[in-house]
Amino acid sequence: MDAMNFNFACAEPAPPKPGSVGIIGAGPSGLAAAGYLSCLGYQVEVYDKLPKPGGLMLFGIPGHRIPAERIALGVRDMERKYGVIFHTQTKICCSAPLHDEEGDHFCKEMLGFGELIKKHEAIIICSGSWKSRKMGIPGEDLPGVYSGLEFLFPIRAARYQSPSVKIPDVAGKNVVVVGAGHSAVDVVHGAIRLGAASVTMCYRRTAREAPCGVFEIERAGELGAAFRHLVTPLRILGAGKVEGIEIRQGELAEAGERGACAMVPGSEKVAALPADVVVAAIGEIATPPFAKELGLEDVRKGEVHWLHMTAIENVFVAGDALTGPSKIGKAVYSGLRAARSLANWLDLKALNRQDAYAYDDLIAIDDHKGGARP
């Protein structure tokens, strides 16, 4: 099996450069940044709370989509050929409480953010999105209600034998999945493999509008999952545990001339679906350390002199930590942009010529025109 080539920017390592760069997070953006900077000859150290590098590529996305072996081989190449050092099970603390996010319980070491700033010439925060969105409805805290990450993460992480990791017990149970993105589809597949008696997807729009695409909805149907469109969850039913979910559902009108689907006006009805397990796969939230102090909102708006640089001069940010949840390709691209900007800054800083940096370089111009490269 071919390795993921995180060092695609070069064929061989460059001569070593003085100093080191720290990267917080070993997901798509962090690994892309590490590959780019190690190609330039920097000593790169990557810090991640999980037991293996890969982030959600490894611990959230099923292996049939992204084989774990390809990630592991790519990481091994970075370690052996380019000297990248990985500090796994290490959390950089913190503006959020420990154990507030998925994967925190794997941590065996905690380092202060200030320690890294002193240790490295520059840092890139690529901490990803590890906190799930809530539905905000009554009963959401009942046992048997999961977020998409809470459901999927243990399935992928169980092999690392942490006592805190327990695969959801859905065998013989009725499972309702709220959402229709790729995470929701992965939950459906996981529940079916774990022996659920029934699986029902509920989505606020139609199958044609589902983020995962019609093909994935049809594929889930072939496996036995049901799909309900135009659904709004109202509350989780049960006393001490999940016993059902109350929803409001509209009736789907016939497709128009352009194939568009809509709800029949006034057709919404309230109903209760039987459920023993409810999974809200409705997205994640990025929780980068010290977001306010770093001025991340200004970075998102582009109100900075250096591309991807935060309010702290030698700290950069990339991936979901900057943009919020996105696709892997966008996270990789963001990591590469931040790494390039960081490298430019270090080069000019060594010459005491930081003012010579042009923010509207080719990459920034691409973004302004909406022509981001793949």
Image (cartoon, rainbow, N blue to C red):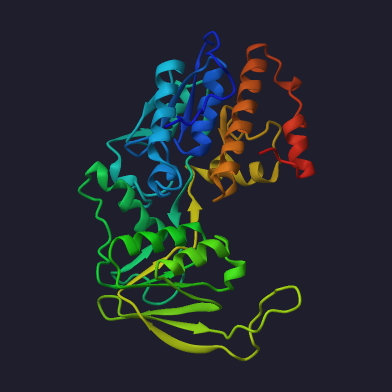
Q: Quick one: 265 or 44, which is closer to the camera?
A: 265
Which one is nearer the viewer's eye here, 90 or 271?
A: 271
Q: Residue 191 in the image: x percent, y percent?
A: 34, 63
Q: How many marks?
A: 0
Query: Height in image: 354 above or below 369?
Result: above
Spot occupied by residue 93 in the image (x, y as percentages of width and height): 39, 39
Which of the 4 image quarters holds residue 253? bottom right
Which corner quadrant holds the N terminus?
A: top left
60 relative position to 106: left or right: right
Q: Is residue 202 above or below residue 169?
A: below
**x, y (%) of residue 208?**
61, 69
Q: Quadrant of the C terminus?
A: top right
Outermost residue, front side: 222
Residue 39 visible to an observer of this rendering: yes
107 relative to 36 in the view: left or right:
left
Q: Is residue 277 left or right of residue 177?
A: left
Percent x, y of residue 333: 61, 37
Horizontal placement of 350 versus 277: left or right?
right
* Residue that lies at the very extreme toward the top in this rendered image: 15
Q: Is residue 260 above or below residue 65?
A: below
Whether residue 99 is visible to the viewer of this picture, yes or no, is no
What residue is at 38 percent from the left and 39 percent from the top? 68
Q: Please tell me which residue is depicted at 75% across the width and 73% down the height of the picture.
A: 258
Q: Which residue lies at the image location 30% right of the left edge and 46% below the top edge?
A: 157
Residue furthest to the left: 163
